Amino acid sequence: MRSVVARITVVVADDHPVYREGIVRAVKERPELELVGEVATGREALEVIAALRPDVAILDMRMPGLDGRRLLNAIGRDRIPTRVLFVSAYLDSEIVFAAIGGGARGYLSKEATRRQICDAVSAVARGETVLAPEVHTGLAREIQLRSSEDRPVLTPREREVLRLTAEGLSAPDIGERLYLSPATVKTHLQHLYGKLGVSDRAAAVAEAMRRGLLE
């Protein structure tokens, strides 16, 4: 007896009818894919995805009514298990970074072939992440930039004060250890709070650990 392979359900959302029809045709030609909806706007896409909960949604980033980023946020907010594959002409590194960071499982250029798009749908359905070759360099640069922004530059003295604060020493104790007045230590702490975006010692230590500033 032959085993039945579950098909991957797909929704296609793009406001360009000719381009959308090309993807729809390609999906219908793939035996492992099952088209369950096609729409032109973000609002329609959200309604269909919420109702049908397809395995994968192929979305454009820019759509009338509700753009791809907001639609992705709504899918995550409502805990809809659908995996999102963006196929877009917008390949700006900030947009791609936000999409992947927001939970998208793939991002392809509209220059991708129909076969590449369908292959990406299958990969995304398996839990893989698929990125267009055109976005790799920009995305890597964006990650590096965000990482450097997340790790503020501390002076050597601020690092010492932070380390001793993490060890539980009070401002007077830190001052005695570093031959500084308590007032000077408190000034360094205020600078640390500002750089870390916090307002007290405990939060400073927690935030510094999150950002990898403390071993």
Image (cartoon, rainbow, N blue to C red):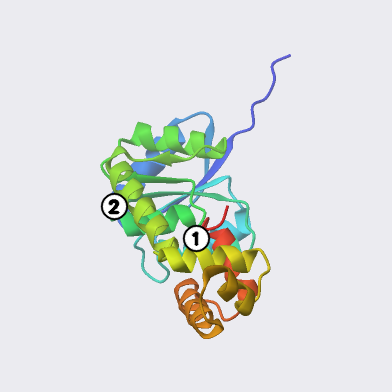
Q: Horizontal and vertical percent for residue 191?
A: 45, 78
The extreme bottom residue here reads 183
**Badge 1 or badge 2: first in the primary sequence:** 1
- Closest to the observer, 126 or 166: 166
Residue 77, picture quadrant:
bottom right
Query: Measured along the vertical axis of the image, is residue 188 above or below residue 45?
Result: below
Front tag of 1 and 2: 2
Give the residue drawn at x 30%, y 35%. Answer: 113
Q: Amino acid at mark 1?
A: Leu
Query: Measured along the vertical axis of the image, is residue 190 above or below residue 20?
Result: below
From where the camera sits, is residue 42 visible? no
Residue 23, picture quadrant:
top left
* Rendered image: mark on residue 166: none
Give the residue drawn at x 49%, y 60%. Answer: 72
**CA distance for labels 1 and 2:** 17 Å
Residue 39, picture quadrant:
bottom left
SS label for mark 1: helix
**Going by the image, does 37 lie left or right of 78?**
left
Q: Quadrant of the N terminus?
A: top right
**Going by the image, does 84 lie left or right of 132?**
right
Q: What residue is disc 1 on?
A: 72
**Going by the image, does 174 lie left or right of 29?**
right
Q: Horizontal and vertical percent for residue 69?
A: 43, 63
- Closest to the observer, 5 or 181: 181
- Closest to the observer, 74 or 129: 129
Q: What residue is disc 2 on?
A: 91
From where the camera sits, is residue 52 visible? yes
Q: Horizontal and vertical percent for residue 29?
A: 43, 31
Query: Measured along the vertical axis of the image, is residue 101 above or below residue 188?
Result: above
Q: Horizontal and vertical percent for residue 169?
A: 66, 70
Q: Are marks 1 and 2 in contact (CB under 8 Å)?
A: no
Give the residue drawn at x 43%, y 56%. Answer: 99
